[in-house]
Amino acid sequence: MALRKNLKRIGLTVLLLVLIAVVIIARKVFPAVSGYGAKNMASAIYLQHRNPNDVIKEDLADFPKSLGRYEFNQQDSSVTASVWGFAKRKAIYRSGLGATLINDFTEEQVRAQQFNLPSKPSINSDTILWPYGDKIVDTIPDNVNRTGLERAIDHVFEEKKNGESVYTRAVIACYDGNIIAERYAPGFDKNSVQLGWSMSKSLTAAIIGILVKEGKLNVNVPAPVPEWKGNEKEKISLLNLLQQTSGLDFAEIYTRPSEVTTMLFSKGDMAAYTASRPLKYAPGTQFNYSSGNSNILSRIIRHTVGEKDYAAFPHTALFHKINAYSFLLEPDASGTYIGSSYSYATARDFVRFGLLYYNNGKWNGEQILPDNWVKESVVPPASNSFKNYGYQFWLNGQNEKDITKKAFPDVPDDMFYMDGYGGQDVYIIPSKKLVVLRLGVSTINENKFLKEVMGAIQ
C-alpha cells in the first residue's frame, strides 16, 4: 500500500512538473507564434491582397507557426492571432505603412501617429525603359544562352525541401544592367509587393550612407544613442553597428525564444529594447549577427533626420531617386521603421536597389551613396573570422562548416548579397556583370542556382 501511495505521489509530482514546464514554454513561445502570425497575416491580406488560406498554407504552415488561429476585422483592417485562445496579439494595417503589432503602446496611440509620406510621381512606367521605368527590351545579348538560363530558373521553381515546395515566387536575372530573365509564381507578378525580411538591413545601411554623405553621421565615432551616454556602451561606434560587432548581448535564434523573437513580436520600441541589452563583448571584438543592431541604426536615422522629415526620408533620399516607388517600410509601435526585417517592394524594385550597389552607389548620373561606401560595405571586420559580412550585406566568405572553402564555392569572391529569412536574396556579382534576385518562402541551393545562371552566360 505504501509503495502504491509513493508511486502515486511521484506520478503526481512528475505530472505537476510537466504542467509547469508546459506553462513556462507556452508563456515564452505562444506570444512569438501569435505575434508572428498576426503581423504577417495582416500584411499579407491588407497590403499584398492575398487569400488568408493561401497564407496559412504557404507562409504559416511550419510548426510552431501552424498553431496560430486568426480573427479578421475588415472594418478596422486588423488581425488578431492567438494560440488556442492564449497570448493574443493584434496587428493593425495603415495605408502607406503596412502592418504594426500593438505592443507597449495602446492602439489609440499607434493610430494617432502622423507620418508625412511623399506622393509617388504620376507616370506610366511601362513607357520608360528599364531601369528608370518598366519597359523591357525583349532581346538578350548573343553570349547569353536563353535555354540554359530558363533551365536554371525551372530548377528553382521546381525545387523542394524535405519533400515540400520552397514556394519560389520571383526570379530576375539582370545582366550588364538589363533584365534578361524574369518569372513569377501564379498569383504574383511584376506589380506584386513582396516581403524582404532581412534584406531590409541593406536598405537601412544605404540610408545611413546617405546621411554620412550629407555630413550628418560619421561611422568612426560613438553611435548617437542617448541611453549609452556615460556608461560602458558609449564606446560602440556606428561602424560596430553596421558590421554587427556592437558587443551587445543579443541572440538571433528563431527556433526557440530569444532576444530577436522578443524584440520583433513583444516590444513596441525595438531599438530601445536592444539598446538596453548589456554588453557581452568589448565593442568591435566579436561578430554577432543581430537584427537588434539594425533597429538601433533605424532609430539613429530617425533621430538624425528629425520627426518632421523622418517618415519621408527613405523615399525622397533613396527609393524615389532610383525609380523604386513601391517600397514600403513598416514601423514598430513607437513609430520607428523596423530596419531589420519589414520592408516590402516589387521584385524589380529590389533589383533596382541591387543595381545601385552594382553601380557603386550611382544612379542616372547622381552619386547617391558616398564615393567609397560600396567598397567599404564589402570589407569584413577583423573580428569576423568567416569574412562573410560587411555593412549589413553578406559576403562570399568562408564556409562556416569548412573554413577551407568559400560559402559559395562556385561563385566569384566579389559576390555580395542582401539576404532575408526564407531565401529572399539579391546577389550582386560585379565580375560577372550580374544582379540576380530570388524571392520565396524557403531557402534554395543558392550556389547551384547561381552557378547555373553564370553557366548560361559565355
Image: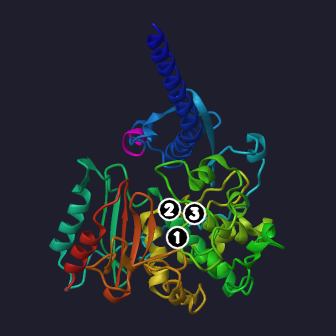
On the rendered structure, is 406 left or right of 106? left
> SS at mark 2?
strand
Task: Specify which label sits upstream in the sequence, 2 or 1.
Answer: 1
> SS at mark 1?
loop
Protein image colouring: rainbow
Task: Specify which label sits upstream in the sequence, 3 or 2.
Answer: 3
Q: Nearer the viewer, residue 89 or 289?
A: 289
Give, as a single range, the part of the protein colored magenta. Answer: 54-59
Instruction: Sort mark 1 into few (<14), some (14-19) or many (20+) by Cα contacts within 10 Å.
Output: many
Q: Nearer the viewer, residue 357 or 77?
A: 357
Q: Which residue is mark 1?
A: 324
- Location of the C terminus (image quadrant): bottom left
On the rendered structure, is 119 left or right of 1? right
Q: Which residue is mark 2?
A: 345
Helix, strand or loop: magenta stretch: helix
Q: Quadrant of residue 156?
A: bottom left
Q: Nearer the viewer, residue 21 or 251?
A: 21
Instruction: Sort mark 3 into few (<14), some (14-19) or many (20+) by Cα contacts within 10 Å.
Output: many
Q: Residue at x 63, y 74 (%)?
A: 241
Task: Spot the residue most to the right.
Answer: 230
Q: Quadrant of residue 146?
A: bottom left
Q: Which residue is mark 3?
A: 291
Q: Residue at x 58, y 36 (%)?
A: 24
Between marks 3 and 2 in the image, the one whose residue lies nearer the viewer = 3
Question: With respect to residue 100, does 416 lie above or below?
Answer: below
